[in-house]
Image: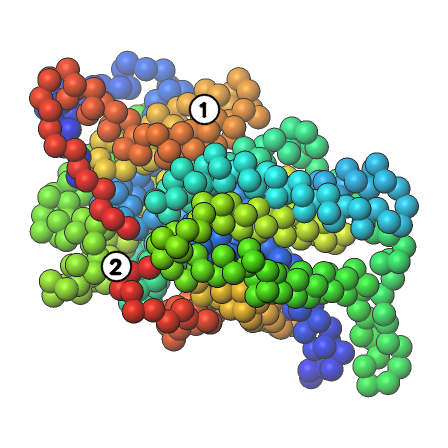
Amino acid sequence: MLDLPLLIGQVFNGFSVASLVVLAALGLALSFGLMRVINMAHGEMLMLGGYLAYLTFLVVPGPLALLVAMPVAFVGAAAVGAVIEVSVIHRLSSRPLDTLLATWGTSLILQQGARDVFGPIGVSVTAPDWLNHSFAIASGPLAGLSLPATRLFILLVAVVVLAALGLFIAKSRIGLLVRAVNQDRMMAAASGINVRQVDLAVFCLGSGIAGLAGVVLALLGPVTPSVGQSYIVPAFLVVILGGLGSMVGTTIAALILGLVSALSQIFLDVSMSQVLVLVFVIVFLQFRPQGVIAVRSRALEE
Amino acid sequence: MTQTPFLSRLWIPVVLLAIAAPWLISGYELSLLGRFLAMSILAIGLMLVWGEAGILTLGQGVFFGLGGYALAIHMKLAGLEPGSLPDFMEWSGITALPWWWVPFKSPVLATLMVVVVPGVFAGFFSWLVFRRRVVGVYFALITQALALSFATLLVSQQGATGGFNGLTNFQTLYGFDLNAARAPVVLYWVTLALVVVCFAGVRWLIRSRFGMLLRATRDGENRVRFLGYDTTPYKVVAFTLAAMLAGIGGALFTLHAGVISPALVGVVPSIEMVVWVAVGGRGSLWGAVIGTLAVNFAKDEISSYLPGAWLYVLGLVFILVVGFLPRGIMGLAEDLTRRSARKPQPQPVEAPQ
């Protein structure tokens, strides 16, 4: 009864969900690896990216609006991220659970702010013409399979961002500092690295990537004040599943969860598949409580 | 646990005043007070699990909801003509009662379910997670995902749960008419009695050896392990008890409010529950109750004047309390009384994380 086009279509959907979630989760995972802190207002960076895309599309008409919107959203979200890091997260970073609560307060304020500025009903962005079609296969064994261009674009964005970030961390000087702080914060500080600046830079970078994800999100559906909330819980699960702040782990975890979610939707409705994803995470933690990529360490407590 | 001597001596007048409340305040205020007291039972449980054991849970709404729905299902069935189905099931085209509704016909069984369902579920869930030593931020985020899944599941199973609107329009419970004139006052006293019982029970518990081990686990879980204790069962028991208290709170809330719906149990309400305890003071039982009443009366006032402003206030309160007043109202009160008594006492030292 399993027909091939449906299966491939769902696998493709899984990859496109995974690419959105990985963009949302990267910033969380990077900051978590460095500071052991989760920013609950991270979802609002997606929302902000979405609204910035909407504003850019108003100001810059034409097919290039999307290409302008992406840097705008990146910079805008990174700037707001910097404000949150300096004003809330840095002050509380010795108390991870309290940071969780305080950043959740920040997220409430940002959501209500968006509601007051843009209204409770979402705003929409019209995807440019070059994204407004889909690759449909009409004949052969895969007849009926249709791949929308926007979803291919999301996949492309995620791959480009991952590659760029990977290169940045592996090759650049700042990347070297980030790896050093990630491995051993105290030793890094003792050898003269300004740990504080590394924290801030990584946080801004992560927020900016979430802003990019927001632009992509705006192509898929309306941007609402609570749009970030629907993506952030899967992103949290991806961080848990991925292991402490590992980029590779985050990517693998996002792919696993995206595929579990999309494939289970062949048999189940959306809400049941959400439950299944959570059950999957809990079962997975029974076997690998440290996540996909475990950091080997002799330290007793992280 | 924070010592609050002035309130320990004041508890008799406070309880007497609370018993006399029906004669002192208006019917509307009494209905709010009753509802908030019901919620404070949940807060007492949250204080046990978060304040004492140091386990932050962002999913108490799930257990609140399980308790609430358990009683609501019974009340739906109790108000039915024999052979008929609850109204919303007929609208959704359901022809037979779902099998898991059947046990709730019995009032005794349904009342037991209010604590048993949240308890069993919380026990199993927390055992799975704690036994693999998943703690701290990880645990908090998993419980949040739990709250999200629970709320979406309730909405999607329209035919069996009433969907987005939840369950409402209750008539009778244990043969009593819920719309009788005396019903709100009786319900208020029942709630108050349960608050006192739960308060005293948890107070006894946190002063016992069990409570001491919970605090030790909070401050240095590995040190407790090295002393030869397995910390998992302690944490599972604390989490399970908190879930049962949340279930009782949810059932009483459903009676007071006359409704239980997914909007009351999802991600946002679950985290709001943490605010109650944070504002009151997570290290104090009095704080849990006072915080619940203070936050919810403030919410009621502010929402009626400026509907949009509540979320700003809530967000700011969250940031400010956590940032500047981590011991909440009770911590502040304690500092003030100490300063006036001019008795310098050693400050507790924060355990290294």
Q: Which mark is residue A170?
A: none
Residue A227 screen position, x and y as percent: 63, 46
Inspect the image, locate mark 2, and give the three-letter code of the amino acid beneath it.
Val
Disc ID at residue B236: 2
A12 left or right of B266 in image: right
Disc 1: CA contacts within 10 A as few (<14), some (14-19) or many (>=20): some
Callout count: 2
**SS label for mark 2:** helix
Residue under label 1, please give it: B300
Q: Is residue A275 above or below residue B281?
A: below
Q: Position of residue A61 (x, y in %)?
A: 88, 42
Estimate the x, y position of residue B127 in percent, counting from the top left. Answer: 29, 64
Residue at 61% in and 43% down: A78
Q: Residue at x 85, y 40 (%)?
A: A60
Residue B285 in the figure: left or right of residue A195: left
Q: Amino acid at mark 1?
A: Asp
- In the image, residue B54 sits, relative to residue B334, either above or below, namely below
